[in-house]
Image (spheres, rainbow, N blue to C red):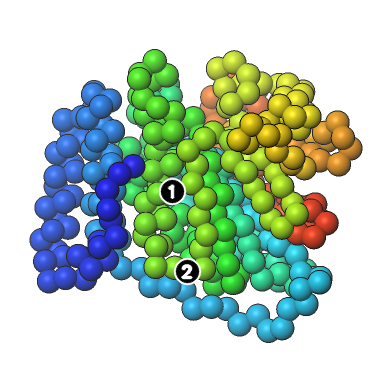
Amino acid sequence: MSGDYSNFADEVAGADQVAELRASLQRTQRQLAKARLKVDDLVAATIESCRDATLSMGPIRPVPIPKLGRINKDKEEHALLITSDWQGAKVTPTYNSDIMEKRVKEFIAKSIHLTDLQSVPIQDATIVFGGDLVEGLFNFATQVFEIDATLFEQYVRVSRLLVDVIRMALVRYKTVTVVPEWGNHGRIGSKRDAVPRSDNVDRMCYELAKQLLAGEPRVVWQDCPEDIQRLVIGNYKALVIHGDEIGRMGFAATSTIVQHVNRWKSGAYRVDGEPWYFRDCYTHHYHTHGEWPLADGEGAVYQTGSTESDNRYASVGLASAAKPSQRFHLIDPRKGRVTAQYKVWLE
């Protein structure tokens, strides 16, 4: 994504806000109508819509710093919120964009409640966004009949929800670090189209939310140009993947995923040519909650569920079903390990 969006807040606050907003939204609608069948034009229109969506959001003020009292640094732990597979705009008998937003915010509220129940001090949090936050348009032929919003509307609403999620977390935590990962549903065009994988609608949503929260000094963002992200909390290190990176056609058996991560851990995963040690791996994509040990007896593969319900493709094609859930962990940053984990139900 290119362009300088640093002065958007001033533009929105100016006297021409209403006229510019109307003109920008009309322009975007015209662009998307023309670009419906042309991937290159669609990419350009989506990037341009970043500016228009930013205008529609208006200025966002920093959240007041919470008063948490004195913290014993020697006993402090770190909250890790893992949320993914919102499938924004997906429609099933029990799911749509409004239910998505309700469940995502419910997860953040429950995570804060779990934080407050702990006997150890917690003042900072990391949020992992595991990908497939949008449903997309290009994954299967009938997808356009199973959504309640166009790609542009998905982009705007999910970006807005990302902002809301982070701001909710800032009410409780002094700092929030964001580790974003993109999924297969954010793909632009078919797999055969010459579009870089990282040109992904999930990633565009992350960038827009980052720009909207640029004035919030308590948020630390990681970029996600690769399809494997690195999570670091003190001495704790983990990998974050969406889950479609392993296997054929985006599907792999659990044993295959664990075997693959074991190989990464034994030295196959490298950064700048050097092995990068990690303890755990967080995966998503399969809409089910799970945990499987790694060969060293210390780490694990943690799989996070989805906010979606009644997935017809999963139940018919894969004979798989799951109840809406997300994941919450506590991390000991000194010992470098997970100290507690929760499956957060969202029905």
CA distance for labels 2 and 1 = 17 Å
Other-residue count near label 2 (Cα within 10 Å), few / some / many at <14 / 14–19 / ≥20: few
Between 161 and 103, the residue placed more toward the observer is 161
Work out whether mark 2 precedes mark 1 in sequence or the reverse, and give the earlier one: 1
The image quarter containing residue 18 is bottom left
Q: Position of residue 202 (x, y in %)?
A: 44, 41
Inspect this view and state whether residue 93 appears: no
Residue at 28% x, 56% y: name it.
5
Q: Is residue 309 visible?
A: yes
- In the image, which disc is placed on residue 206? 1
Is the C-beta separation of discs 2 and 1 under 8 Å?
A: no
The secondary structure type at the circle numbered 2 is loop
Q: Position of residue 310 (x, y in %)?
A: 56, 35
Q: Residue at horizontal 17%, vertical 37%? A: 31
Task: Please name the residue that numbered disc 2 is placed on.
Answer: 217
Indicate the quadrant where residue 164 lies: bottom left
Report whether 316 appears left or right of 37: right
Residue 52 lies left or right of residue 27; in this view the side is: right
Q: Amino acid at mark 2?
A: Pro
Left or right: residue 131 versus residue 270 is left
Residue closest to the far front: 273
Label 1 element class: helix
Q: Position of residue 206 (x, y in %)?
A: 43, 48
| Residue at point 53%, 41% (across, down) | 181
Q: Nearer the viewer, mark 2 or mark 1?
A: 2
Q: Is residue 55 above or below residue 43?
A: below
